[in-house]
Image (cartoon, rainbow, N blue to C red):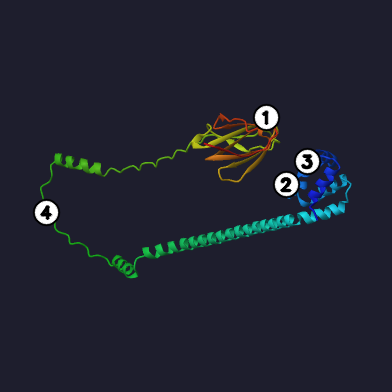
Amino acid sequence: MESVGEFFRQVREAKGLTVDEVSSKTRIRSDFVKALEDGNFAKLPDQVFARGFVRSYARSLGLDEEDAIHRFAQSSGSFYEKQDERERLKARQVEEDRKRESNRKTVMVAVGIAVLTLVFLLSREQPSVVKQGSGEPASVKRSAQASKETPSPAPRQEPEPVTDAPKPAEVAAVSAPVAETRRPELPTPPPIASKPQTEPISMISPGADGPLGGISLEGGAPGADGQLVLDLEATELSWVVVQIDNGSPQESLLRPGEKAQWRGQDQFILTLGNAGGVKAELNGKPHKPFGPSGKVARDIVLKR
């Protein structure tokens, strides 16, 4: 039995119809009609839609639809069987990758718990070892205590030699430095620690009921301390997703006139639902437009 495409081509040419006329009559794109006649099933949509094309084509030529479907099943059977097998293999590969990733995460969690447990046990053992090592032997303590309790013999007093009485001038000269050495020293007051001055930080609030109330902080000049500062101002209603460095994405909805600011260290990754609806500044410098109004822009990387 000849293929369904060859059968359709013979009947179409016998009736004097062109591919464009069949396309206009059946409302099937001309490239699909040509692919069906050539047996190029890879260019056709899914099997369900391809069967609908066969029925419409057969109806437009006045042919039996069931016979056309039978011819189509015989002509395209091997192709769609291989396609189904490829889909099954692809789904199996995705499932295996998912299981492999899940097992890897489980192993990482188990290793992390083991490491934390080991660190906790070592931190508990270290103080007890230090405490035992710093203690003195009991015999040394007992001997020190016994030496404290035993009174030491009083030193033998030698008779002081009798000398002539000092002159008044010598007494005054000697007593002056003695009095100076015995002068009590006044304790110096401890230094008073000065409180560090902090710069005021203010909160930007686009509106009391706005979706960005309190989303960003403003403190100091843009780019202070080597940071990246991203400022967005909405000219139209815009949906914004911002990922700072390697952190979690932050999702926001900006109304016209609202502003938002983010701070990071290395880069920002933006996704804009309305590329032409926002104006951006990076460290105070205006950035070129991200695209036309109404277009979605994904994975825009802004870095130093």
Secondary structure type for disc 1: loop
- State the residue position of label 2: 43
What is the C-alpha distance between the residues marked 3 and 1?
44 Å
Mark 3 or mark 4: which comes first in sequence? 3
Tell me, for residue 24, which label it has, or none: none
Tell me, for residue 235, which label it has, or none: 1
Secondary structure type for disc 3: helix
Q: Can residue 201 be seen in this view?
A: no
Q: Nearer the viewer, mark 2 or mark 4?
A: 2
Mark 2 or mark 3: which comes first in sequence? 3
Between 189 and 9, the residue placed more toward the observer is: 9
Q: Which residue is at the far front?
A: 14
Mark 2 or mark 4: which comes first in sequence? 2
Q: Where is residue 268 in the image (x, y as percent from the top left)?
A: 57, 39
Q: Residue at x 84, y 52 (%)?
A: 68
Amino acid under label 1?
Answer: Thr
Secondary structure type for disc 4: loop
Instruction: Identify whether 53 is placed above or below 285.
Output: below
- Left or right side of 216 for 149: left
Q: Residue at x 54, y 61 (%)?
A: 113
Amino acid under label 4?
Answer: Pro
Q: Which residue is drawn at 86% across and 54% down?
A: 67
Secondary structure type for disc 2: helix
Q: Residues within 10 Å of mark 2 (few under 14, many from 20)?
A: few
